[in-house]
Amino acid sequence: MLGELKAEHFLPLVDQEFTVMYPDYQTSLLLYKVEHGKKSPSPGRFREPFSLFFNGTDANTVLHQQNHPLTHPTLGTLEIFLVPLGRNEDGTFYYQAVFG
């Protein structure tokens, strides 16, 4: 499923929460932006690159750079590689996921 996703799948989900669940904790991320990447001249390319940007909701939780199980009611659970980019003014972290 992950390989079939395009930016258009996420555009209607901006401002919605995704849940990250692990056996010992869970946290929520808010999708705040979907950004289209540069178009590639590669023939046969399935999708155009895009990035997702999320805000964390808990200042005490940082998700490290790795795959995380993100669950959304529309998309189900997806293993998405997240990179923490920094902290927001309220102390929460913000993240990027890149799809090539």
Image: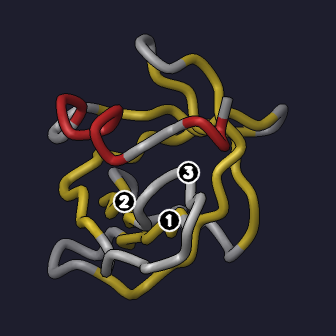
Q: Nearer the viewer, residue 81 or 87?
A: 81
Counting from the top left corner in percent of width and height, residue 96 is at 43, 71
Q: Which mark is residue 55?
A: none
Q: Image check: 21 left or right of 36?
A: right
Q: Give the residue pinned by disc 1.
A: 97
- In three-dimensional space, the C-alpha distance between marks 2 and 1, rounded to whole angstroms, equals 5 Å
Q: Nearer the viewer, residue 37 or 14?
A: 37
Q: What colouring method underlies this structural image?
A: secondary structure
What quarter of the picture does the N terminus occupy?
A: top right
**Farthest residue, direction bottom:** 86
Report which residue position mark 2 lands on.
52
Q: Measure the C-alpha gap from mark 3 to mark 1.
A: 18 Å
User: Where in the figure is residue 34, as x and y percent of width and height?
Assistant: 24, 56
Instruction: Name the amino acid, label 2.
Output: Leu
Residue kind at label 1, given as amino acid type: Ala
Q: Amino acid at mark 3?
A: Phe
Farthest-out residue, top: 73
- Marks 1 and 2: in contact by CB < 8 Å? yes
In percent of the image, x 56 and y 27: which residue is there?
71
Label 3 Cα crowd, 10 Å radius (few <14 / some 14-19 / many 20+): few
Circle 1 — which element? strand
Residue drawn at 68 percent across, 76 percent down = 65
Residue 38 against residue 7 in the figure, above or below: below
- Residue count near mark 2 (Cα–Cα under 10 Å), binned few <14, some 14–19, many ≥20: many
Please report whichever mark, 3 or 1, sits nearer to the chain's N-terminal start. Answer: 3
Residue located beneath label 3 in the image: 46
- Tell me the mark number nearer the camera, choosing from 2 and 3: 3
Where 7 sits versus 70, above or below? Answer: below
On the rendered structure, is 72 left or right of 37?
Answer: right
Question: The C terminus lies in which quarter of the figure?
Answer: bottom right
In the rendered image, which quarter is residue 48 located in?
bottom left
